[in-house]
Image: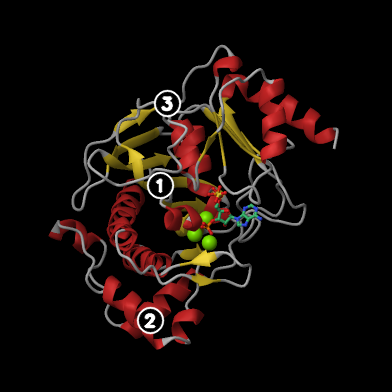
Amino acid sequence: MAYEKELQIALLAVQRATILTKQVFHSHAKGTLSKSDASPVTIGDFGAQALLISALAHAFPSDAIVAEEESSDLRDNAELRRTVWDLVKDVQLDSKEAENLLGGAVKSDAAMLDIIDKGNSSGGNKGRIWALDPIDGTKGFLRGGQYAVCLALMVDGDVKVGVLGCPNLPVDDAAPLSVNIGANASDEEGKGVLFGAVLGEGATSRPMTRGELQKETKIQMKQIEDLKAATFCESVEAGHSSHGDQAEIASQLGITKASVRMDSQAKYASIARGAGDIYLRLPVRKDYQEKIWDHAAGDLIVREAGGEVTDAEGKRLDFGKGRTLAENKGVVAAPKQVHGKVLEVVKSVLGKK
Ligand SMILES: Nc1ncnc2c1ncn2[C@@H]1O[C@H](COP(=O)(O)OS(=O)(=O)O)[C@@H](OP(=O)(O)O)[C@H]1O
Ligand SMILES: [Mg+2]
Ligand SMILES: [Mg+2]
Ligand SMILES: [Mg+2]
């Protein structure tokens, strides 16, 4: 199989990072700060980024990394730095062999800061670049909703490997998507899934563990004949995608079921496994550029499960333009056989505005 080592390292690294995020999820103090764009970041985001990059830098030292967070808030705040370091230094996988593949523990708090900042690549369409989001859906994470730990490898701008760790999604791929899935999240027994895909080799899911990887199962999007019966997923935050446009599109497609709102790339994962059918993310603000780490893994997982992912104009998402999807607006993800129909309605609704 192509990219076998990359997939294995990515799955283990995401699994290890989720041990840390789950620990923070269950702790009272999440160390939340507000970033310059008013979005939140927590000790879980910093800690998970340090663990992910540490693993990548060990296994693939020459690869570039585009990651969401940077260390300046921790350099300016000794107490916060200590809190994150206290988490990072102790988190390890139960399997010694797996932990060795990731290079073991981070050496010191100073090394941790430098590791976090290795995610500062400007991206592009040359060579091997990892795109990583330590906690996607930080608002959801804080609210007790869905969140995802996201990692993707691009080679010359093309996504080759994608991994999503979703601690609060049910393990069972066939579990119906409840409308509350984005609100009443928990990581109790039976929750926690690792999704993976390699270009040309299909997509899989497996239960998340604290050690060795469990056996994977192939996932496929649901074959829908009748769009009226479709379930569509959208963001929780009305500022992240246009609930109004999405409701209008759904209504024109004849969809009668209420949308399922959840944070993070758990939306891509949920449609890829056939729990939902369609993911609509239509822009609210014309000037917002989507970040590559919010889409790279999900885009590949959906396409490898039999779906098509484009922007609102029908263009493939272009991950080779830097840290953002500078050439794309919005996301329309659906099973291949109905994507054209969905896109037609998206264009018509947006065209009338
Ligand atoms: N204005 C605007 N428009 C679109 N997207 C934005 C915007 N602002 C932020 N973000 C990014 O949205 C990421 C979370 O997306 P979600 O789909 O999970 O959003 S939601 O919270 O469920 O509404 C979120 O990722 P995280 O920061 O990793 O949580 C942001 O990168
Ligand atoms: Mg963020
Ligand atoms: Mg994100
Ligand atoms: Mg994030």
Q: CA distance from mark 1 to mark 3?
A: 16 Å
Mark 2 Cβ and ligand 2 under 8 Å apart: no
Would residue 211 be visible to someone looking at this image? Answer: yes
Marks 1 & 3, CB-CB < 8 Å contact: no
Position of 142 with respect to 318 (left or right) is left
Position of 233 with respect to 284 (left or right) is left
Quadrant of residue 105 in the image? bottom left
Q: Nearer the viewer, residue 32 or 219?
A: 32
Amino acid type of the residue that numbered disc 1 sits on in the rendered structure: Leu
**Element type at mark 1:** strand
Amino acid type of the residue that numbered disc 3 sits on in the rendered structure: Gln
- Toward the top, the furthest residue is 225
The mark nearer the N terminus, 1 or 2, is 2
Q: CA distance from mark 1 to mark 2?
A: 27 Å
Residue 220, numbered circle: 3
Would residue 130 be visible to someone looking at this image? Answer: no
Q: Which residue is mark 1?
A: 164
For marks 1 and 2, give the one nearer the viewer. Answer: 2
Residue depicted at 48% across the width and 64% down the height? 65
Marks 3 & 2, CB-CB < 8 Å contact: no
Mark 3 Cβ and ligand 1 under 8 Å apart: no
Please state, as top left, top right, bottom left or bottom right, where the N terminus lies in the image: top left
Q: Vertical placement of 310 versus 294: above or below?
A: above
Q: Position of residue 328 (x, y in %)?
A: 70, 47
Q: Which residue is mark 2?
A: 81
For marks 3 and 2, give the one nearer the viewer. Answer: 2
Q: Nearer the viewer, residue 333 or 10?
A: 333
The mark nearer the N terminus, 3 or 2, is 2
Please state, as top left, top right, bottom left or bottom right, where the C terminus lies in the image: top right
Position of 196 with respect to 138 (left or right) is left
Q: Position of residue 250 (x, y in %)?
A: 66, 26
**Element type at mark 2:** helix
